[in-house]
Amino acid sequence: MRHRVAGKKLGRNGTHRRAVMRNIIASLFEHERIVTTIPKAKHYRRAAEKLITLGKVKTLHNVRRAQAILQDKDMVKKLFDEIGPRMKDRPGGYTRIIKLSKRRLGDNATQAVWELVDNKVLENKLAAEAVEEE
């Protein structure tokens, strides 16, 4: 019985889950849009949104808390200099998960696009497509 057992294991032990969390959130912050499985996106969304909330106010304490989780100085810098200020007026819901109809070829896993709501990469791509159409 699983009574009162919180969290998902995702088929990994604790240290592997922590490493996957660091890598997937760093990739999300770097590319601002990634394709992953639905369970991973839903599980790590909570941690990513907490980091973005930290990034809204740049204090030494918040920087060190983010550094302890991400352990990537470039991503922490981007979080506090670009992503946090962009989400300043938003009270929450910084990411979205869009389910894809196609499944992964290797293991038939359901896939999703996990992206930041104010996605500059997507906006630039859409603007470039609009220019090409004209």
Image: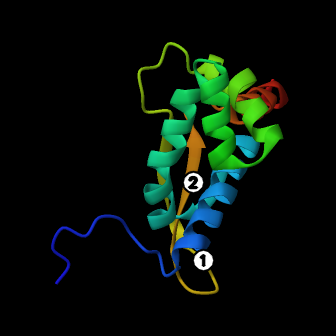
Q: Is residue 73 left or right of residue 57?
A: right
What's the residue at 76%, 43% (across, down)?
A: 30
Q: Is residue 100 visible?
A: yes
Q: Residue at x 50, y 47 (%)?
A: 47
- The amino acid type of the residue labelled 1 equals Arg
SS category of the residue bearing label 2: strand
Q: Residues within 10 Å of mark 1 (few under 14, many from 20)?
A: few
Circle 2 sits on which residue?
A: 113
Q: Nearer the viewer, residue 129 or 63?
A: 63
User: Where is the N terminus found, in terms of image quarters?
Assistant: bottom left
Instruction: Residue 95 in the image: state x and y as whole percent.
Output: 51, 39
Residue 82, position as x, y percentages in the image: 73, 23
The tag earlier along the polypeptide, 2 or 1, is 1
Q: Which of the image's four quarters has the C terminus?
A: top right
Query: Are the two marked residues, 2 and 1, in contact with CB atoms closer than 8 angstroms?
Result: no
Q: In the visual, does 105 lie left or right of 96?
A: right
SS label for mark 1: loop
Q: Is residue 29 above or below residue 19?
A: above
Q: Which mark is residue 79?
A: none
Q: Position of residue 120 (x, y in %)?
A: 71, 29
Q: In which quarter of the view is residue 126 placed? A: top right
Image point (63%, 65%), residue name = 20
Residue at left 54%, top 44%?
48
Dot 1 corresponds to which residue? 104
